[in-house]
Amino acid sequence: MLWSCPYLTPQILLTAALFLPLLCLYLGFIRWLRRKADIQQITKCNGYRVDRASLSSIESLSESLEYYKSLYFKLQNIEQHQDILSEARDLLLCLLSESVEFSEDSQKRGIFAIESFTEDNLYGFLQTSHQDVEKSCAQYFQERAAGWPRRLLADRKQAAEALAQLAPVKFVDGSWLGYIHQITTPFDLRPILKGAWQVLSEELGDGHVCQNHVQVYSELMQELGVDLPAPHTSDFINSKYGLKNVWVFKAAVVQLLISLFPSEFLPEILGFNLGFEGLTLETVILSKELQELKVGAQYFLLHISIDNAHSGHAKMSAHIVTQYLSYVERYQGKHAVQMAWRRIQAGYALSTLHSNHPEWPVSGPVGALSHLESKVLQILTAKAVVAWQLHGACPTKIGGLALSEWLNPERLASERRQREFLRELGMAKPWVIKGNAGKSKLIRELRWGGKMFGSFTQKEVEVLEIWINSLSARPKGQDSYWHFTRRDRTIIHCPGFMGIADSDTPVDEDIPLATISDGIFFTSPLDLNINGAWTRILPLWFSQTSLLESYIAVPSRAATQLGSAIVRILRAQYGFGHEKKGVSGMDEIVRQDSVDLINLGLEMLGRKHFKPIPNSLVDVLTRWPCPFAEKMIRLSKSPVRNIEILLGMSLAFVDLQRAVSASSELLSEAGKAAPYTCITKPRAVTSKRHH
């Protein structure tokens, strides 16, 4: 018992009884002073004066910013962070659901109007979309000719600030295709996905550093005096560089996320590519206004030309989609085509919502308004015109102001006041419960039985619900994606290839390394009885393209001499034509004489009359088990760590290719000529690396 404590004498208790009330009064007074100072304090942030009472919303945005910045780094260094793959997949599903939900109110327009896929409908939609952008461009040019000021870039300083904020997403240009067309692709699907990889190759400059899109944007940053580290480094996300647009980082993360799972989300990747590769008004405006400011506009001019709808990426992306759906119909039937089409639409929605139009980050407390926030404000400001006086007697206060004050059209005419209203509404419990629209009083009042039922249309209520659910730092819920695509969610994502788990750490310590001493060297060409050992060669032959594939999955790694050289090696191994000064575009897509290393492996099997012909690397390694081939695949999963070993192996395979090309038993005359397109580049590149 307290009173039995020998140290608590009556004198001490009396002193405490007198002192404690005084202490409480003192602490309360200090707290009141601090609170008063906080309320009066105005914080300036990116040109906006933000009330201290509004900072909690900014802190929430800051949490999201740090979350996406962390993912931005980890996803570009996935070999050191494979523990996040499960989280990454869950997040991707949530983002797909978020995109589908947001697009539900427009599913009778645009690409969602195509309920049943036909090639004519797809090309008709793309033509209409392109024409809409052209009309917007024409209107912009008319405005400028009439003397209107620049729309996005007021001066060189603002250009530097705004374009620097866009850097995170521009520095992952093409990453959504980073793991496409790899050796795990079914062999009969490779001719189709070769076109998708060609889009990636052209984003990476076809192996020319100066044409790599990341490099081109880096040069723009340098011209504007913006010094940024390599985007795949941890230093890039350091706050000292002032990159704080959460929507841009989120858009970049979306591109990196969707690339990781080509085996499971191939239709979504193709849909994402379809949505991304097209002309945008923003690109046209920036190209013109940068030139007016005497700043190099090559990055944006490049995307106007290379993404064209006749022979460029827009046309290529549509062609790939039609080829893929024909493939699905041939092997799975028409019903499967419609499911695949819905998944392509989901990927398209993800692209247009999150990546194709990252909101222009000229200003804002942490980042510009997202497309979703802009839509919410459009609804609320439109309602305010007819409803603000009706709320005059409403006792509800939001952020210290009566609701009628917020809804005053004169107040909402200010963009700053609109932002404040949206921030305060997002914090106004119980009206808005972040991340949970169902429990939010605002939504309950708008539904049947609520006082405001009927004042908002069903679609408007759904937009508010999506906005409220999006207020949590991370998207929640995957049901919309599963419901829309009608996929069987019981299909479990395969965590690895043939039991080689994604989280396995490549073991390079046990690779036997030859010792060169006493003048003994390997001989070249390879001294091997090819014809007698062809079954031992086959698993290695089919596995060799895995060695360097993943190194260029992160675009900024390809924006180096080594990375660009690896792009050229892969182009040769994949059967692309020799690099020229221009881009191949649709010409390469329709070329009929393309032969890659997989084609040659299948030809060997055909000439040996082996049946059934394998359709995947799994089939090959099941028929001819080869531990070393599996080791190659394992090593290739950590390309940065193992690059020296992988380059050395690639050089060794050049001699194997030479030996095979000399065998009349294994290859036809046409086949024998093909490997020579794959030989000189790997040898030249790896020789330079090792010397």
Image: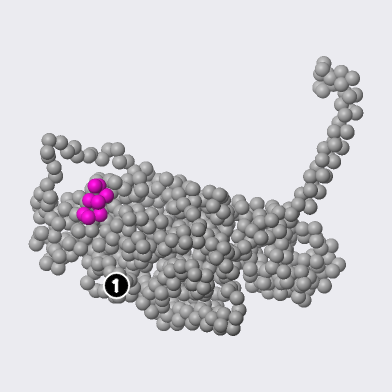
Q: Quadrant of residue 573?
A: bottom left
Residue 689 shows in the view: yes
Q: Residue at x 33, y 62 (%)?
A: 208
Where's residue 210, x and y in %?
36, 62
Q: Residue furthest top?
A: 6
Q: Is residue 608 left or right of residue 141?
A: left
Vertical arrangement, residue 172 with respect to residue 414, above or below: above
| Dominant SS type (magenta) | helix
Vertical arrangement, residue 162 with respect to residue 132, above or below: above
- How many labels sit on residues? 1
Q: Is residue 685 in the magenta section? A: yes
The secondary element bearing badge 1 is classed as helix
Q: Which residue is mark 1?
A: 588
Q: Nearer the viewer, residue 583 or 24?
A: 583
Q: Is residue 362 in the magenta section? A: no
**Image quarter in which the N terminus is found:** top right
Instruction: Tell me how the rendering is colored.
Output: one colour
Q: Quadrant of residue 260?
A: bottom left
Where's residue 546, x and y in %?
29, 54
Q: Nearer the viewer, residue 236 or 71?
A: 236
Q: Residue at x 45, y 78 (%)?
A: 126
Where's residue 155, x and y in %?
57, 67
Q: Nearer the viewer, residue 309 or 496?
A: 309
Start-end of magenta stretch:
683-691
Q: Amino acid at mark 1?
A: Glu
Q: Is residue 622 left or right of residue 604?
A: right
Q: Nearer the viewer, residue 675 or 282?
A: 282
Q: Residue at x 42, y 80 (%)?
A: 123
Where's residue 690, x and y in %?
25, 47
Q: Residue furthest front?
A: 294
Residue 589 shows in the view: no
